[in-house]
């Protein structure tokens, strides 16, 4: 089980949610509990490690947020 806190990044133009117009100026944070299979957890860990190694310090909630937004954009063009 992984608990993820999805939150809006504080950086202006690098915020994919703000660019897509999916969120307003609110910084409201929502806590989410996600139950992941081992395969999905391993994929999340590998993404996190790859970003960490490339010196892009990011937490797992940002990766999860990006994945959800990408899926939303794919299903709602």
Image: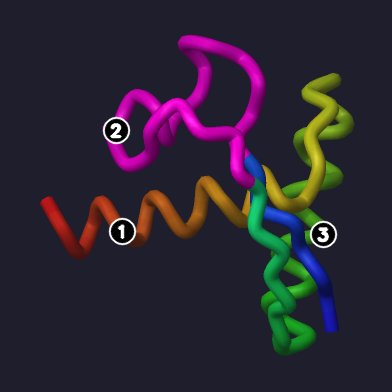
Tags 3 and 2 touching, CB below 8 Å: no
Q: Quadrant of the N terminus?
A: bottom right
Q: Residue at x 25, y 51 (%)?
A: 73
Query: x, y (%) of residue 74?
Result: 23, 57
Task: Give the secondary structure at mark 3.
Answer: helix
Q: Residue at x 78, y 23 (%)?
A: 56
Q: What is the crowding at mark 3: few (fewer than 14 residues within 10 Å), some, or many (at least 20)?
A: some
On the image, numbered disc 1 is attached to which residue? 72
Tell me the distance, in whole angstroms, between the alpha carbons under discs 3 and 2: 26 Å
Tell me the distance, in whole angstroms, between the alpha carbons under discs 2 and 1: 11 Å
Front tag of 3 and 1: 1
On the image, numbered disc 2 is attached to which residue? 20
| Count of numbered tags | 3
Tags 3 and 1 touching, CB below 8 Å: no
Q: What is the crowding at mark 1: few (fewer than 14 residues within 10 Å), some, or many (at least 20)?
A: few
The residue segment tinted magenta is: 8-28
Task: Give the secondary structure at mark 1.
Answer: helix
- Which one is in front, 67 or 10? 10
Query: Most extreme residue toward the left, as rendered?
Result: 77
- First in sequence: mark 2 or mark 1? 2
Query: x, y (%) of residue 57?
Result: 84, 27
Q: Is residue 21 magenta?
A: yes
Q: Residue at x 69, y 70 (%)?
A: 32
- First in sequence: mark 3 or mark 1? 3
Q: Is residue 21 left or right of residue 3?
A: left
Front tag of 3 and 2: 2
- Which one is in front, 22 or 39? 22
- First in sequence: mark 3 or mark 2? 2
- Which one is in front, 26 or 51? 26
């Amino acid at each position: 089980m992984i608990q993820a806190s999805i939150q809006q990044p504080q950086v202006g133009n690098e915020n994919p949610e703000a660019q897509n117009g999916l969120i307003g100026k609110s910084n409201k944070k929502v806590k989410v509990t996600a139950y992941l299979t081992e395969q999905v957890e391993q994929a999340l860990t590998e993404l996190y490690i790859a970003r960490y190694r490339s010196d892009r310090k990011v937490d797992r909630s940002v990766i999860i947020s990006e994945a959800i937004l990408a899926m939303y954009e794919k299903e709602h063009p």
